[in-house]
């Protein structure tokens, strides 16, 4: 029996797609987590954003931290990968990457991007997890565990 295969260009366009985001875990000298408050959402978030077309996630994380906070940080290890199923208006799943951005030793260097953000603040780990969206709440303790164990954590959809 003969099988017919699609030409590669058609086959690739037939595959499912996902949205991709990349964030960075930044802490201060007191080991508190830096969160940003977007002006277009009711909750706080780790600094980061959506990956541009063709952009690697690690490049996105560094770019977003520079754009949002004016910080030029060295990219650390990948801490968390999360698969988030479609929900609400987002009809595709999301793949979220969280990289370690290390410690912000001088918070006075933060320059907030006022077009998108209302605030940036350091929070204790347990409080930070309550400030983010329900979909991202598991990111905070997972990032802490990954940083401490120096092992990437995968958070599957529940």
Image (spheres, helix red, strand yellow):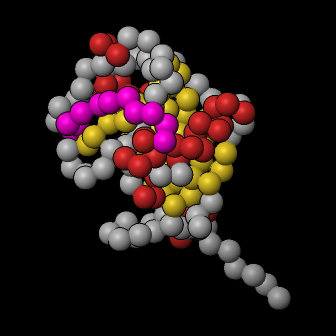
Q: Compared with residue 63, is residue 126 higher up or lower down, i.e. above or below?
A: below
Which quadrant of the figure contains the N terminus?
bottom right
| Residue drawn 70% across the image and 79% down it | 4
What residue is drawn where x is 53% and y is 47%? 139
Q: Is residue 109 above or below residue 148?
A: above
- The answer to whether any part of residue 20 appears in the image is no
- Residue 145, magenta (yes or no): no
> In the orientation shown, which residue stands out farthest toward the right?
1
x then y, percent, for residue 149 = 72, 33
Left or right: where 2 falls relative to 59:
right
Q: Is residue 109 found left or right of 24 in the rendered image?
A: left
Q: Position of residue 28 (x, y in %)?
A: 45, 20
Q: Residue at x 45, y 68 (%)?
A: 86
In which quadrant of the rendered view does residue 92 lie? Answer: bottom left
Numbered range of the magenta stretch: 116-126
Please provide percent x and percent y for residue 29. Answer: 48, 16
Across and down, in percent, residue 13 comes to 51, 65
- The extreme bottom residue here reads 1
Quick check: can you spot residue 100?
Answer: yes
Q: Nearer the viewer, residue 127 or 152?
A: 127
Q: What is the total number of numbered labels drawn onto the structure image?
A: 0
Q: Which secondary structure is most common in the magenta stretch?
A: strand
Is 118 one of the magenta-colored residues? yes
Q: Quadrant of the C terminus?
A: bottom right
Query: Which residue is found at the position 30% from the left and 50% from the top?
Result: 43
Quarter-of-image position of residue 128: top left
């Amino acid at each position: 029996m003969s099988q017919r295969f699609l030409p590669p260009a058609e086959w690739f366009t037939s595959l499912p797609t996902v949205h991709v985001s990349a964030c960075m875990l930044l802490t201060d000298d007191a080991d508190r987590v830096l969160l940003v408050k977007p002006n277009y959402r009711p909750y706080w978030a780790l600094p980061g954003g959506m990956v541009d077309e063709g952009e690697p996630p690690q490049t996105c994380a560094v770019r977003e931290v520079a754009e949002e906070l004016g910080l030029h940080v060295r990219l650390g290890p990948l801490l968390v990968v999360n698969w988030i199923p479609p929900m609400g208006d987002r009809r595709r799943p999301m793949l979220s990457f969280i990289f370690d951005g290390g410690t912000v030793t001088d918070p006075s260097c933060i320059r907030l991007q006022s077009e998108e953000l209302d605030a940036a603040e350091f929070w204790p780990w347990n409080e930070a997890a309550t400030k983010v969206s329900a979909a991202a709440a598991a990111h905070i303790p997972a990032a802490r565990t990954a940083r401490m164990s120096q092992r990437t954590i995968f958070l599957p959809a529940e």
